[in-house]
Amino acid sequence: GAGVSQTPSNKVTEKGKYVELRCDPISGHTALYWYRQSLGQGPEFLIYFQGTGAADDSGLPNDRFFAVRPEGSVSTLKIQRTERGDSAVYLCASSRGAGELFFGEGSRLTVL
Amino acid sequence: GESVGLHLPTLSVQEGDNSIINCAYSNSPSDYFIWYKQESGKGPQFIIDIRSNMDKRQGQRVTVLLNKTVKHLSLQIAATQPGDSAVYFCAENNSSYKLIFGSGTRLLVRP
C-alpha cells in the first residue's frame, strides 16, 4: 500500500483480555517500530525490528507485551491480560534502513 | 527537560502570521533532531530535520533552529495557514533508530 496500515483502528476490550494489533509497513521497508502514545503526550518507543528480529525491545513495559514480525513484513503487537493503564494509541512506523520514519494512523486501544 | 501532561501548551496565531514553536531537549547526546506534525486521529508526520552539526535548516515555509548551548530547538512556520493547525512534537535521535519525543505544542490558527 501507499502508507503504513494499522488494524484495527479502534479496539475496546475488557480488563484481563488478550489483544492483537496489526501493522502492515510500507513495502520494501526493512525497519519497523512500535510506539505508544497516551493522551496529551508524545509517542514512546516500544520495540524496533530490523527484518524479522527484534533489534531492541527495551521499551516494552513488561512481559505482558510481545511483538513479532515472522516474515520481515507485517508485525503484530500482542498484549496479554490487558489493564486499564494499557489504554493508549499504539503507533507503528516503518523506514528504509535508518531513514525517515513513516507512521501509520495508529490503533486506539481502550481497556474498560 | 521534558514535561508531560494532559494539557498541551497551546499557541494561537492569526492566519498569515509567523509561528514559533519551541522545544527543550534532553541531556543525552543526540545527532539528529526532527519536527513532527500530528493532526487529530492521525500519526505523526515528518516536517523537517536537522543534524547536530548545523544551527539552521530551511524548508518550504518552515525553518528549524538548533541551539546546542542551551539544548533548545525551535520550529518557525512562515505565513501560518489553517491547515497548519495540529500538535507539533520535537524528537531527538541519539541512536540509529530510536526517537525520543518531547512534549507537544498545539498550534491553533485563527481565521
Image: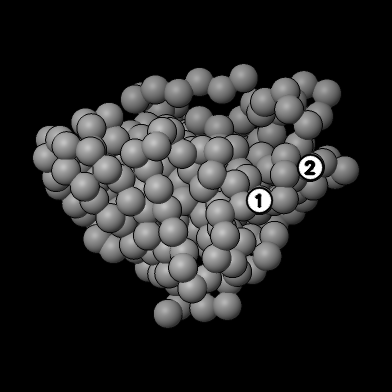
Q: Quadrant of the N terminus of chain B?
A: top right
Q: Which of the 4 image quadrants contains residue A30?
A: bottom right
In the figure, is residue B76 to the left or right of A112? right
State the image coordinates of residue B84 (x, y, percent, origin top left): 46, 51
Q: Amino acid at mark 1?
A: Tyr
Name the residue: 46% across, 46% down.
Answer: A35
- Mark 1 vs mark 2: which is more N-terminal? 2
State the image coordinates of residue A91 (x, y, percent, origin top left): 41, 51
As drawn, B72 above or below A20: above
In the figure, is residue A79 to the left or right of A96? left
Name the residue: 57% across, 60% down.
Answer: A53
State the image coordinates of residue A21 (x, y, percent, origin top left): 31, 56
Q: Amino acid at mark 2?
A: Asp
Name the residue: 27% across, 43% down.
Answer: A80
Q: Nearer the viewer, residue B97 or A66?
A: A66
Q: How is the image coloured?
A: one colour
> Are callouts 1 and 2 both on one chain?
yes
Q: Are marks 1 and 2 in contact (CB under 8 Å)?
A: no
As drawn, A32 above or below B7: below
Q: Which residue is mark 2?
A: B31
What chain does badge 2 belong to? B
Q: CA distance from mark 1 to mark 2?
A: 11 Å
Q: Which residue is mark 1?
A: B97
**Label 1 neighbour load within 10 Å: few <14, some 14-19, many 20+:** many
As drawn, A27 above or below A53: below
Residue A42 visible in image: yes
What chain does badge 1 belong to? B
**Residue furthest right in the image:** B53
Mark drawn on residue A103: none
Name the residue: 59% across, 67% down.
Answer: A51
User: Secondary structure beneath disc 1?
Assistant: loop
